[in-house]
Amino acid sequence: MRKKYKSLKTQLLLGFLFAVQLALVYSTRNATSRYNVVLVIFDDMRPVIGGYGDRLAYTPHLDAFMNESYYFTRAYSQQALCAPSRNSMLTSRRPDTLHLYDFYSYWRNFVGNFTTLPQYFKEHGYYTYSTGKIFHPGISSNNTDDYPLSWTARPFRPKTEKYMNSPVCPDVSGVLKKNLICPVHLQTQPYKTLPDIESTTEAIRFVQTRTKNRKPYFLALGFHKPHINFRFPKQFLNHFRIRNFYNYTEDTIKPHDMPNVAWNPYTDVRSRDDFKYMNISFPYGPISRLQSAQIRQAYYASVAYVDDLFGKFMANIDKNNTIVLVTSDHGWSLGEHAEWAKYSNFEVALRVPLIIRTPEYALDTAKRVNTMTELVDVFPTLVDLAHLPSLPRCTDTTQLACTEGKSLFPQLGGVGLGEEHVALSQYPRPGTQPTKHPNSDKPKLKNIKVMGYSMRTENYRYTLWVRFHAQNFSRDWTDIYGEEMYDHRLDAGEEMNLAELPEFDDVRTWLRKKLIVSFSK
């Protein structure tokens, strides 16, 4: 008891000293100049980065950036779908708060006029600008990327973006196709360029024009890759031998103990011209070993391509005066559980890179942080790193600027590293079985009847699939359609579902109660 009391006193003392340090730094930064802030978001990128230990990856620029940064090894998206994840991250509100699980509602009109991350910086004297994909385009960002509320100037969208789902992939006979795998020569593409090249060029132009401007800036750079289709300059394939991707995972069929409701039938992969004639059985496949290896090779080449662009961009950043945070909106399955794409509650679909570099805590070697983190933590973390007024915790929907996450800033200062946190995610389904119509990978709100709620703890991933009422956004925790429990100490790949084994009843019951409490706050 005495030992526990001393530990509590030590934590309180460290917290007090950190608060004093934060106040001193805040007053110092106000007296001089504020840091610029750069937010870089990759699309559909799991941590296939050399610095994260991936031996197949070719990411020299991200690796170099990590060598002087903090990197979080357990960072998770709140939903493995672009619009819900991005709106959640940029408002620091969970999907159940925003009531956005698809692409077809704008939170300001639908639930509340919630303040966004760039808007908060804009309101505190920053010039805010966006280039590439930050908000998901379309209805979910009011068809304006939330301009002018979030941005000082109109966001830059590359002119070649409109060709992303067009037939621009030449096959062996020269016919243009809508392929999944699409290595190209730039001179064959519209305007002889690609969207991410345009976005990077514009981001560099912006940074260069701000060098003599005393007003601090908040710049968000959003890459489209490695989102499908895998369209990238052909030379990036040279870094990857196809033979290295055959034995990436041993999974070739759906695990027998996976609930059917948990399965995503990768409908977007199947719809591409180079795959739709392959007669891949719906919904469980499988995809052939050669096709599987080709998809993985193209995914890694897409990451290498945007890593190269990231390096070109970072060469123009004044690191002594700029905070840089790098992340992704969610991950992507590469054949684990015989699944592809996102659209699930598995680790590979939810886990993202999260890398932070700040001049305030300069490093000469990478510092690993194992604390459980979420994308809803990005907003309060950047606010504290810039020493703006900290965000309060959200207590009701009338608060316009608040967080449902936590700031990671104390952890960069060495405080709170031992605290236990969980990561919460979710995914909707239109029913208990995979379907084409309605699309069980991307159901519209009106069709959602089941919600999978997932919790990642220190040792476990626990997922509960329950009845969801789209009319009033309520759920019935007693009407259960599937249950999953994976022990990451022995099963990092989430291959063995322990939920139905009686010897795990006690821990399963504890996890269920913890999940329900966590999602009911």
Image (tube, rainbow, N blue to C red):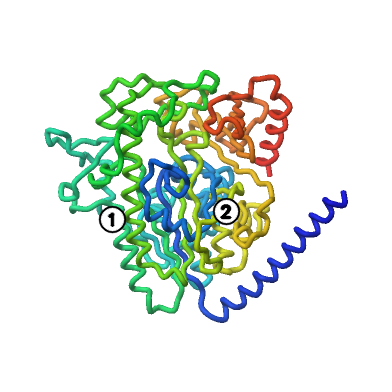
Per the model, the C-alpha gap separating discs 2 and 1 is 29 Å
Q: Position of residue 430 (x, y in %)?
A: 49, 28
Task: Work out whether 385 lies above or below 437.
Answer: below
In the displayed orientation, state which residue is furthest to the bottom. 31
Instruction: Name the image quarter holding residue 301.
Output: top left
Q: At 68% across and 53% down in the image, what residue appears?
A: 395
Instruction: Please tell me which residue is depicted at 24% across the width and 41% down the height of the picture.
Output: 183
Q: Amino acid at mark 1?
A: Ile
Compared to 509, does 364 lie above or below? below
Position in image of residue 86 (x %, y %):
47, 49
Residue matched to label 2: 377
Tell me which residue sits at (76%, 63%) in the image.
13
Residue 466 in view, yes or no: no
**Type of amino acid at the residue the image marks with label 2:** Asp
Q: Residue at x 56, y 45 (%)?
A: 74
Looking at the rendered structure, the secondary structure element under dot 2 is helix
User: Is residue 206 at least partly visible in the picture?
Assistant: yes
For disc 1, the neighbor class at 10 Å (few under 14, some 14 to 19, many from 20) is some
- The image quadrant that residue 146 belongs to is bottom left
Quarter the C terminus occupies:
top right
Secondary structure under the numbered disc 1 in the rendered image: helix
**Drawn side of residue 155 relative to residue 416, left or right:** left
Disc with the residue nearer the chain's start (2 vs 1): 1
- Pointer 1 residue: 197
Toward the viewer: 43 or 361? 361
